[in-house]
Structures are given as structure tokens and as C-alpha cells.
Amino acid sequence: MEDITKELLYTAASAFSFDGQCIGLSQNTEGHINDTTILTYCDQEQEKRYVLQRINTGILYNPEELMDNIVRVTAFLKEKIAASGGDPQRETLTVIPTKDGKNCFADEQGNYWRAYNYIENTICYDKPDKPVYFYRSALAFGRFQNLLADFPVETLHETIIGFHDTGKRFVQFQQAVSDDLAGRKHLVEQEIEFLLKREAYTKSFDDRTDLPARVTHNDTKLSNVLFDRESGDALCVIDLDTVMPGLSLHDFGDAIRFGACSAAEDEPDLKKVSFDKKMYDLYRQGYLEACQEQLTKREIELLPMGAKVITYEQALRFLADYLNGDIYYRTQRPEQNLDRTRTQLKLLADMERMI
Ligand code: GN1
Ligand code: MG
């Protein structure tokens, strides 16, 4: 974010068809990947907010295809939401086009920017303080799956090739171990061994019988759901950067990995970290309530494996990044990727006993 000057921001903002005059901006540092600014505009004495994001093209290296996925998926959702009497402006994201009608803006420095409407009167949670929020997020992600069940999945771009290819993540992890770029390997021998011993997880979904390609979100963290401040209902699924063809099991698993955990993803004190089976059951219940009729028998059977595989994969990714010197995930402190790794390992060990 440091390299984003006000000038750069204003140039980007002026490329979009926002209504009125910009009267304020604030940074939002929640995400690990993109740079997010909230812009306040005033139009005929009415204030309106927008989300302006610089897409991290180091990671999301296909911004145009990514935006094409998002625009088509949100348009599809909007139709279904409207048809069922919902509010298409609040229940899914609205992409604001550039003044020349594009889905994103490429500036002279090669930065890619995109903009959304800011959805007012909402809140999101980093940790499920109350189980009911987690349950409601399951309804939201299940609904997302359900509404998109008849979207032509084969027309979506695979914007990050092999995103949940656990075998490929394993190979990248092995590479990070052997390169030891940051000279940290000697600090994490135990963690490395834990992961190498469990290589079998990379093959869990190799037999794709009855595991159809679905429109998947691929980042189903609780914090990617907006809740309505008044009703407390899960309103809108956000962060659609990784919407791609994928497996429902990965979406289910990622939600569990994040939400059925007693502590934050980067909690340094492992005594506070454990897998919460009650939360798992609650999420499973909500998810199935919302999309059971779309899922095959085999998908339902493999839900627990989805949770384990994705937790394993996330540990591979965090530890590889720690070994590589924190070049992928944004960090605020030197040991953060290691803490993130350890929480995943603790969770996985618990899951192996409990589900
Ligand atoms: C990243 O966008 P954000 O920060 O929620 C990552 C996910 C990880 C997550 C871990 C494109 O998500 O895959 O599960 O961090 N996104 C990408 O918190 O790599
Ligand atoms: Mg994301």
C-alpha cells in the first residue's frame, strides 16, 4: 500500500463512473492480497461510498479474465436474487464500470483497478463470536452454491491455474523447503515433517467420480460474508477474486478451516487454538440446508475430507511462504506466517481425531 500515492488513487478513481465529487478516502487493510480504499462521494448532498481496489496482479495475474468472471457471476446472481424477491444491490456485489465501459482500469504504471458499490449498514466478522453467525454464513455460501448451480461453469476462466491443486501446492512446498530462501528451515523442522508425513492428502480427490466441477468461491472465510447490521442476517458473499470452476468440497472445507476454529488464523498462542466440532456440525447443517439438493451423495460423504484437505493445503501454503521470506501473504510481523502455519497444523491434528 506504501507505494500508492494520493495522486495515483485520484487518477484511478477518476477513471470510474462514480456519481458526484470525492470528499474523502480511507484505507482498509483487512485483506491479504489487494489494496483497498473506501471512497466517499457527494452527489447532490447525498453521500455515497465506493470500494476502489488495486488488484494484486503478482497473484491475480489475469485481472481481465478475473473481472469477466466476477461480472458474469454477479449478473447471474442479481437476476436470481431479483426473481426471488431479494435486493440485488445488497445481496451481491455490484461492479462499477470505468467511464469507457470496461470492467477494470489499467493505469500508466501497469496497475489494475476495479470498483464496487460499498454496501452500507453491514458488518463482517474475523472470528465467529457467536455460533449463529457462522451458521448464517453457511446459509450464505450454500445459497451462493445453490443459485449458481445452473451457471455454465465451463465458461468461467481458471484465473489462477491449479489454485486448489493440493499436489501442486505440495510440490511448491517441497521446493520452498529445498530452496530455504529466507534461511528459516532450521526453525521449522517439526512442522515440515508433519506436512511431509501427510502427503496422502494430495490424492484425496484424484478420483473425480461424482465430484462435478462447480462454480466455487475458493475463499469461503467467514470474513468474506457481509452481515446486515440491523437484521444480523448473512447478506452478501464478497471477495469474488477466486471465483472459478472447482470442487464444492474445497469451499466447504475452507469455511470450516477458518470458522470452526477457536482462535484467529494467526493466533500465536497455540493453547487457544482448537477445532470446534460443534461449529463444524452447525456449518454443515446450514450449508446442507441451503444446497443439499444440488450436491451428489459422494460430495456429501466427503465433506469432512474437504475440511482436512484444505487445512492441510493452507498449511503447505503458509509454511512455503514463511520459508520463502513472506513474499505472498501480507504480514504485519515476522512470525505471522509461522503462526498461521501452526494454527493450521493444530486444527488438522484435531480434525483427524474428531471428523
Ligand atoms: C488469501 O483474499 P484473502 O486475503 O481473503 C488467499 C486464500 C487464503 C487466505 C488465507 C488469492 O485470501 O487462498 O485461503 O488468504 N487468496 C489468494 O487467509 O491466494
Ligand atoms: Mg480472497
Image (cartoon, helix red, strand yellow):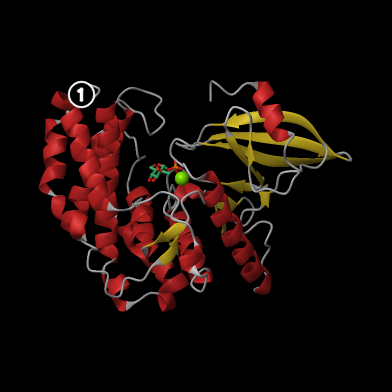
How many marks the image carries: the answer is 1
Q: Nearer the viewer, residue 105 or 141?
A: 105
Q: Nearer the viewer, residue 67 or 329?
A: 67
Q: Where residue 207 sits in the image (x, y, percent)?
A: 22, 68
Which residue reaches farthest right? 44
Query: Does residue 161 appear left or right of residue 238 in this picture?
Result: left
| 4 over 271 or under it: above or below | above
Q: Quadrant of residue 249?
A: bottom left
Amino acid type of the residue tagged 1 in the rendering: Arg
Within 10 Å of disc 1 (Cα), the crowding (few <14, some 14-19, many 20+) is: some
Q: Nearer the viewer, residue 226 or 214?
A: 214
The answer as to whether callout 1 falls within 8 Å of ligand 1 is: no
Query: Does residue 158 appear left or right of residue 64 in this picture?
Result: left
Residue 275 seen from this side: no
Q: Residue at x 62, y 21 (%)?
A: 5
Q: Nearer the viewer, residue 149 or 292?
A: 149
Q: Quadrant of residue 342?
A: top left
Q: Quadrant of residue 191?
A: top left
Q: Where residue 254 sits in the image (x, y, percent)?
A: 36, 53
Q: Where residue 288 sits in the image (x, y, percent)?
A: 40, 71
Q: Which residue is mark 1?
A: 184
Which quarter shows the C terminus? Answer: bottom left
Q: Residue at x 69, y 57 (%)?
A: 89
Mark 1 residue element: loop
Residue 178 seen from this side: yes
Query: Does residue 29 appear left or right of residue 74 in this picture?
Result: left
Q: Where residue 203 sits in the image (x, y, percent)?
A: 19, 59
Q: Residue at x 89, y 40 (%)?
A: 44
